[in-house]
Amino acid sequence: MTKLALLVRATALLLCLLISQAASTSHGQATVSEACLSSERDALLSFKASLFDPAGHLSSWRRGDNCCQWNGVRCSNRTGHVIKLNLRNIDMDTGGYPNMSRSLSLSAGEMSSSLATLQHLRYLDLSGNDFTGTSIPVFMGSFGKLRYLNLSWAYFTGTIPSQLGNLSKLQYLYVSGNYDGLRAVDLAWLTRLPLLSHLDMSFVYLSFVRDWVHTFNMLPSLKVLRLSECGLNSTMSASNLHSKSNLTHLGVLDMSYNYFLGTSFKHNWFWNLTSLKELYLSGFGWDGPIPNELRNMKSLQVIDLSWNDLEGLLPSNLEDLCDLKTLKLNGNNVNANMDEFMDRLPMCSRNTLQELWVVETNMTGNLPVWIGNMTNLTVLEASYNMLTGPLPVGVGALGNLKTLDLSYNNFSGVLVKEHFTNLGNLESLCLNYNNFSGVLLKEHFTSLGNLESLRLNYNNFSGVLFKGYFASLGNLKFLDLSYNNFSGVLLREHFVSLGNLESLRLSYNKFSGVLFKGHFTGLGNLKFVDLSYNNFSGVLLREHFAAGLCNLEWLDLSYNNFSSVLLKEHFESLRNLKFSDLGYNNFSGVLLKRHSTSLGNLKHLDLSYNKLNSVLTEEDFAGLLNLEYLDLSYNSLKLAINQKWVPPFRLKVAGFRSCHLGPHFPEWLKWQIDIDVLVLGNSNLDDVIPDWFWFTFFF
């Protein structure tokens, strides 16, 4: 190679390196200094200015900062344009309803159109916020590159703008959960969205749309279609109702809680959807037998036909539904023997079925012995039926079970530890309202370490709760043993491991003994305590309530033999208490002065049928701002209340039978204009009933 050629080649390589470095430098400056385009930053700040933000979600949105680093904003690394705006209420991520106190809302009555500046947006999520009373802005249809749009649960109203049909690249559209605030009379604009794969219009009022089947049939990319509670009904034309579907990719169809009264299952447009995996038709208003047409839908994994008027067993020709994982038939009239019903389940899916819901189906007979073979079951809900017999021991083999609800039946017999041996994943066990009997030992619960809810109320269980009875139930939140025949003394050791407990119901048993200091130590999550209708006795001390029960809202100790004087110290820590029933005990005095300020949330106070002999003045009630129910009947109390006193509360129920109110008629009652029940019998009144009494309570 000549020197000239080498020189030319070297020069060319050098030029390439220089050009490459220049391009790299230029690109680097774009991603750093121009990552946030000023016009788009200003647009976002204008949008923020139109919103209330009580939770501070947009606190990072400040002028002069790089908007690509703001909360909820994402930019393109290549161009710097804003491509994603996620302002979703975080409550939506936990599966709950959005908390409006944490949501964004409009401050100026309408959404700022400055968002339209963000023409490179691909993703926009405003779900779970509060845009009450406003329509979906027309400019939402101007985002030509948008692929994802979520406006669900945002309280929009009015008609969905047809301009959304301009979003030709849209793949995901969610406008659900706006509770009849949104409506549409024409859906033709949807046909201009050829890439749409996920559509959720649940709660959008579509009753006036006539060609809705035809419209959805022109969306060949649809994979998920949700139309729950849309007001769709049987007034649609017969040609649409029976039209053949072209939705060959549709995997999920939810049309629950629309009312197709009087229409037939047969020949409906969705029966030939062989790709369908999930079918939700609950609350559809259909009657007659469960449709045979299900046999053609061999890919089905979820079938929900709940809350219709269907009758009879499953069709006998469903043997090809081998992928079935969830079957929901709640609220239908199966009216058959449980054994026979279970025999109709597809043989090939018995080992794969995960959820079986047959609540309130008029089912009779026994659970089949072979139920232990359904080892993939995670949910078995069969409450509100007429099932009988003992519980098969095979239930204890369902190691994946998380929910077992057999409540409100007629099961009987004794439970043994083998019923629960392998139920280590169980989170909810409801056997209440049956006829189970026998003694429950701590060995019954040893393997139930994940249990959060245990409801055994309204049975005939008996026996004593020994130390360590609940030692393995550290995750338990709800414990209900009421309406049984349990007996013995409750010890602190019974509760020492129940630090997560929120509700404790032990009423209508035969428990006895004294509650000692520290009985409730470590139970700071308790909100509900009901020990009524037992034989507890002894003196209540402030330590019983001062041991961290600051979250307690409901306390029922009625129909026992507790004694002592109730002092302010008893209630100082119970600032969240709303319901307190201490009636039918042996309390001998009550001094409410000054400590009633701790009970500002109290709505229900029952001290009736005790031995209280104190003198109460208006000072004793001064802090009871929310009181609605007050019963002091059958005590020896004297109410020495100033006739000019204006109570801070409005009672609905007031009981003063056998209290000393007189001799003058209590003038303060004139302010209790919401009273429905007033009991003043044998209260030492020796006065003429004033005219205001008749006017207040009878007109």
Image (cartoon, rainbow, N blue to C red):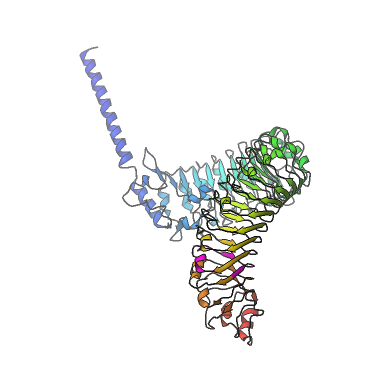
Q: Residue at x 67, y 41 (%)?
A: 417
| Side (left or right) of 324 relative to 625 | right
Q: Residue at x 73, y 43 (%)?
A: 391
The residue segment tinted magenta is 566-587
State the residue in front, 459 or 62.
459
Q: Is residue 611 above or below residue 32?
A: below
Residue 174 is inside the magenta segment = no
| Side (left or right) of 285 relative to 185 | right
Q: Residue at x 50, y 76 (%)?
A: 619
Q: Is residue 539 above or below residue 343?
A: below
Q: Quadrant of residue 318?
A: top right
Q: Is residue 604 above or below residue 176?
A: below
> Is residue 288 in sight in this rendering?
no
State the residue in front, 114 or 388.
388
The furthest residue to the top? 1
Residue 216 place in picture, x, y as percent: 61, 44
Residue 387 place in picture, x, y as percent: 76, 47
The furthest residue to the left? 3
| Quadrant that contains the N terminus | top left
Residue 572 is inside the magenta segment = yes
State the residue in front, 470 or 621.
470
Residue 234 place in picture, x, y as percent: 70, 51
Residue 489 place in picture, x, y as percent: 62, 55
| Side (left or right) of 11 relative to 545 | left
Q: Is residue 570 above or below residue 644?
A: above
| Quadrant that contains the C terminus | bottom right
